[in-house]
Image (cartoon, helix red, strand yellow):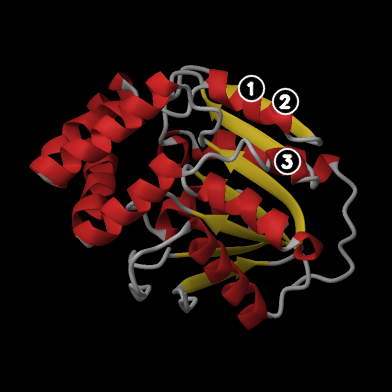
């Protein structure tokens, strides 16, 4: 299927990081993370196809399609090598990009993603997808809210929570269900061991769908990885703990010796 020319933004200076958001989000979801990194890195964020200001493209989508959209951005910006930081579904796009385009990938940070799902894990995520198809996306927003945010954050930051939920509502329902299907169906375990670039695996301690249990297995399978569990947090780390996410990514990238001769 044809790639899509996604809407993107570029800020900062230095080695390049491309940030890949998750289901029903926007490139702006990364803003609070990027502000901590743009003094040392060129930061590229973009709207996934069908999200924000990016064109929808043709259905059905595949994970490979979403990976190829990243490659289109890299070529448009003439980036020689880059780091990839992906959240949730973006944490699946990132490592597959690294597998398909190894020479262009310096490292991958997999944030709040999933692999090695048990049958029980699969049934739970598929139940959410089934409920959305049957009842509509709006009817499960409370479920998403409780999965994504801690109780304290919901109580104290209603505007931020409502803004994230509005992103979901503003996403074409067909697009939302399509990318959620990819997230539910993707199983990275058969090929994760082939991703040899340095990887940071990070999730929240209380993330139910992308749990520490699954992320420990991901880190163990990747040949060159570090694992970080952020205490108390759930799924929406980019909104609830952007400073901690940025700190961990920054520390990870500076701890490695990359060939940074060619970057944007």
Q: Quadrant of residue 78?
A: bottom right
Residue 100's place in the image compared with 53, above or below, is: above
Sequence-first tag of 2 and 3: 3
Q: Position of residue 135 (x, y in %)?
A: 9, 41
Quadrant where the C terminus sits is bottom right
Q: Position of residue 64 (x, y in %)?
A: 54, 61
Judged by depth in the image, the label closer to the viewer, 2 or 3, is 2
Instruction: Tell how many labels.
Output: 3
Element class at badge 1 = helix
In space, the residues marked 3 and 1 are separated at their CA atoms by 13 Å
Label 3 environment density (alpha carbons within 10 Å; few <14, some 14–19, many ≥20): many
Element class at badge 2 = helix
Element class at badge 3 = strand
Q: Residue sitting at 19 percent across and 53 percent down? A: 169
Query: In the drawing, what numbered circle is on residue 161?
Result: none
Sequence-first tag of 3 and 1: 3
Q: Residue sitting at 56 percent across and 38 percent down? A: 111
Residue that numbered label 3 is attached to: 199
Q: Are marks 1 and 2 in contact (CB under 8 Å)?
A: yes
Residue that numbered label 2 is attached to: 220
Q: Residue sitting at 27 percent across and 52 percent down? A: 177
**Image position of 237 (left or right of 156):** right
Residue 222's place in the image compared with 26, above or below, is: above
In space, the residues marked 2 and 3 are separated at their CA atoms by 11 Å
């Amino acid at each position: 299927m044809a790639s899509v020319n996604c809407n993107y933004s570029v800020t900062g200076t230095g080695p390049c990081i491309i940030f890949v958001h998750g289901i029903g989000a926007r490139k702006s979801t990364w803003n609070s993370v990027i502000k901590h990194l743009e003094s040392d890195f060129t930061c590229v964020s973009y709207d996934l196809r069908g999200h924000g200001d990016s064109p929808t493209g043709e259905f059905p989508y595949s994970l490979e399609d979403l990976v190829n959209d990243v490659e289109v951005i890299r070529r448009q910006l003439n980036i020689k090598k880059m780091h990839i930081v992906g959240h949730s579904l973006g944490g699946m796009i990132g490592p597959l990009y690294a597998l398909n385009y190894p020479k262009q990938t310096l490292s991958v940070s997999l944030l709040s993603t999933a692999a090695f799902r048990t049958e029980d894990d699969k049934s739970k995520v598929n139940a959410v997808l089934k409920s959305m198809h049957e009842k509509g996306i709006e009817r499960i927003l409370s479920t998403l809210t409780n999965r994504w945010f801690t109780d304290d954050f919901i109580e104290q930051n209603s505007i931020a929570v409502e803004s994230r939920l509005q992103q979901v509502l503003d996403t074409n329902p067909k697009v939302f269900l399509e990318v959620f299907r990819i997230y539910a169906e993707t199983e990275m375990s058969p090929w994760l061991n082939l991703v040899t670039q340095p990887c940071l695996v990070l999730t929240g301690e209380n993330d139910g769908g992308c749990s520490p249990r699954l992320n420990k297995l991901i880190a163990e399978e990747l040949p060159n990885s570090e694992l970080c569990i952020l205490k108390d947090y759930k799924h929406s780390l980019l909104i609830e703990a952007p400073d901690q996410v940025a700190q961990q990514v920054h520390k990870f990238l500076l701890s490695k010796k990359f060939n940074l001769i060619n970057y944007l």
